[in-house]
Image (cartoon, rainbow, N blue to C red):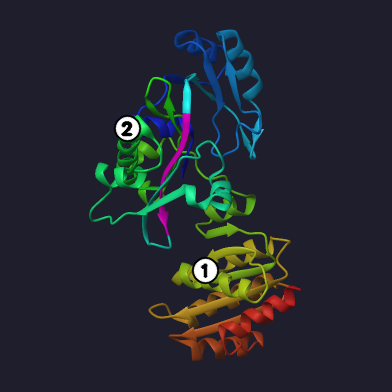
Amino acid sequence: MNFEEYAGKPLLAGRGIDVPKGGLAKTPAEAAEIAARIGPAVVKAQVPTGKRGKAGGIKLAATPDEARIHAKTIIGMEIGEHKVEKVLVEEQMPIERELYAAVLNDPLSKSPLVMFSTEGGMDIEEVAATAPDKLHRQPVDIRRGFSHADAKTLVQGLGLGAAEDKVADALAKLYSVYAAFDAELLEINPLIVTGDGRVVALDCKFVMDDSGIVRRPDIARAGTPEKLTGLEASAKAAGLKYIDLEGNVGVLANGAGLTMTTMDVIRHHGGRPANFLEIGGESYTQAKPALELLLSNPNIKSLVINFCGAFARTDVMTQGVIEAIVALKPKLPIFFSVHGTGDEEAIRLLKDRLGVTPLATMDDAIKAAVEAAR
């Protein structure tokens, strides 16, 4: 779950990270009132996406009237397919340096990763590509955590001068927020050093692991649910785990791991998966709505149905799919891979009911589907 800047910053402030004074406004009049209270302000669109400044969603206001005018312009804008419904009005800060700080889940080290750069304010992807030596990384052993001393080691020798200790303090506190609130990503860009020596989080991007939502409903209430496509919304209503992708090879499998593997093998053979859709051991009852969903996607030109049974029996799963195919009569080519518990019965069902023989391996089925989609 994504959190807009206004919802992420209080989490930082609660752990002692300095943030600008300001307030949330849903109308131009409210923006003017906040600016009158805090002085020269920044009016910032609140949407769960980046590049707001490039889209015209961040404006400086010297007076309350300018804040009102900017808010009127920004509220109602479309940024990254999100309509702006509110703005964050914050005090302007005397910026001396812009830094970058983040903690994220790192699949390579299989641990949290603290990242820091003296090149704040830029797209971090650009920094990583053009000046990788300026992006410093520190994997974290979750049994130890990330202390002030660890942060000092990370930032030493980077020319931070008198701000070094305060920057290290902010990094250690940032990790504590990450750990406390089930974050997948917690990013400050820029983390600034002001002319009077403060270290302030000028922005905040916070993404919570969806598994943490049930543990922290108090925090999750302020989050912005991911924007769903029409098919994703239909799938959610039907209780299906579905994600739209941009390819043309449809995927239906049991279990998230097998579904991801199927997608990877499609790409390996030069194809493009059209979706993520796994129906697990409930495929006997979910096969029809799942197949209806896939058939309603006009981009899908072929379909891989990949079942691998351990505790769940493949013949029971296959029976559900057969009933769905008989009822819906799909016209696109379908390729089966069935292995594991009950596979002999499943293969016999497919031959008897549909006149179809599953391919010998998952690889064979996927290669055939990729070729058919072309």
* Residue behind mark 1: 260
Label disc, if present, on residue 283 of the rendered structure: none
Residue 186's place in the image compared with 282, above or below, is above
**What number of labels is visible?**
2
Question: What amino acid is at disc 2?
Answer: Lys
Q: Which of marks 2 and 1 is nearer the N terminus?
A: 2
Q: In this rendering, which labeled residue sits more in front, label 2 or label 1?
A: 2
- Whether residue 250 appears in magenta in the rendering, the answer is no
Residue 350's place in the image compared with 159, above or below, is below
* x and y, in percent, of residue 251 in the image: 60, 70
- Whether residue 103 appears in magenta in the rendering, the answer is yes
Segment colored magenta = 97-106
Question: What amino acid is at disc 1?
Answer: Met
Circle 2: is it few (<14), some (14-19), or many (20+) Cα within 10 Å?
Answer: some
Point 44% across, 19% down: residue: 22
Q: Cβ–Cβ below 8 Å for labels 2 and 1?
A: no
Q: Nearer the viewer, residue 213 or 297?
A: 213
Q: Which of 136 and 268 is in front in this view?
A: 136
- Quadrant location of the C terminus in the rendered image: bottom right
